Image (cartoon, helix red, strand yellow):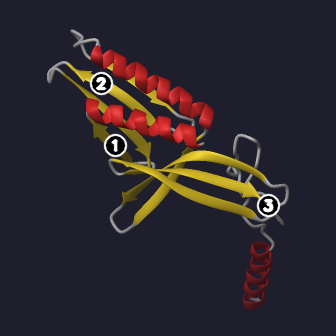
Amino acid sequence: MKKSILLFSFGFCTILSAQTSPPVIKKPLTTSSGLKINSRKGTLIEKKIYNLAKFKTLDIQKIVTKDMSDQTAESVLGIIYEYETFDNTSKKTLTIEKAELSKLIQSLQTLEQKENEGKPDQEVKYKFLTLNNIEFGGIYNEKLKSWINYIKIPSTLYNQSLNEFSKDELKELIKILKNAEQNL
């Protein structure tokens, strides 16, 4: 009797677990024109990547996605970086659209102007946060009497990639981003 009840309950649980639906992607990758790449079924999507520049440990690329059914294409700026955990090395791509890229360039140019105005008498911080949570910023360190510029990229929940760079490298980054904006 006990064996038949156990066998029945085991069979019942097996049937219930087999009936569950597959996981659903809650936030598919959506581009500015509404092209949802992850949710497009029955459509061939073409992706082309063009390397534009390398800044510190980041690769700057132009990414073009094209829906082959209606020939609509969209290009974005991709920032590719590597991050490492104890037993795994991974690459991740974060994108910036053209409208957001122009705002980023303006913000970095403003930061460059603030650095050229002279040394403030107290600690000052500036930051620009993109839609993909990439943080660009600058801090005037009063103790060191110098500016520290940085890019903070979210990689995992507990780990963030931080790239610090100098005033001259800020000029180089602005030049790279302006070139990328023209290519988009």
Q: Residue 159, how many percent across, how many down?
A: 38, 49
Say whether marks 3 and 1 touch (CB < 8 Å).
Answer: no
Q: Which numbered mark, 3 or 1, is in the foreground of this view?
A: 3
Disc assigned to residue 68: 3
Say whether marks 3 and 2 touch (CB < 8 Å).
Answer: no
Q: Residue 63, how many percent across, how many down?
A: 59, 52
Residue 101 in view = yes
Element marked by disc 3: loop
Q: Which residue is mark 2?
A: 139
Q: Which numbered mark, 3 or 2, is in the foreground of this view?
A: 3
In the picture provided, is 2 more to the left or to the right than 103?
Answer: right
Crowd tier of the residue under label 1, counting other residues whose Cα lies within 10 Å: few below 14, some 14–19, many 20 or above: some
Crowd tier of the residue under label 2, counting other residues whose Cα lies within 10 Å: few below 14, some 14–19, many 20 or above: some
At 27% from the left and 32% from the top, the residue drawn is 168
**Amino acid type indicated by mark 3:** Met
Q: Residue 153, how many percent across, how many down?
A: 43, 43
Q: Which residue is mark 1?
A: 162
Quarter placement of the C terminus: top right
**Amino acid type indicated by mark 2:** Ile
Say whether marks 1 and 2 touch (CB < 8 Å).
Answer: no
Quarter placement of the N terminus: bottom right
At 26% from the left and 21% from the top, the residue drawn is 140
Q: CA distance from mark 3 to mark 2?
A: 46 Å
Q: Residue 3, how many percent across, how many down?
A: 73, 90
**Amino acid type indicated by mark 1:** Leu
Above or below for 125 versus 95: above
In the picture provided, is 9 more to the left or to the right than 167?
Answer: right
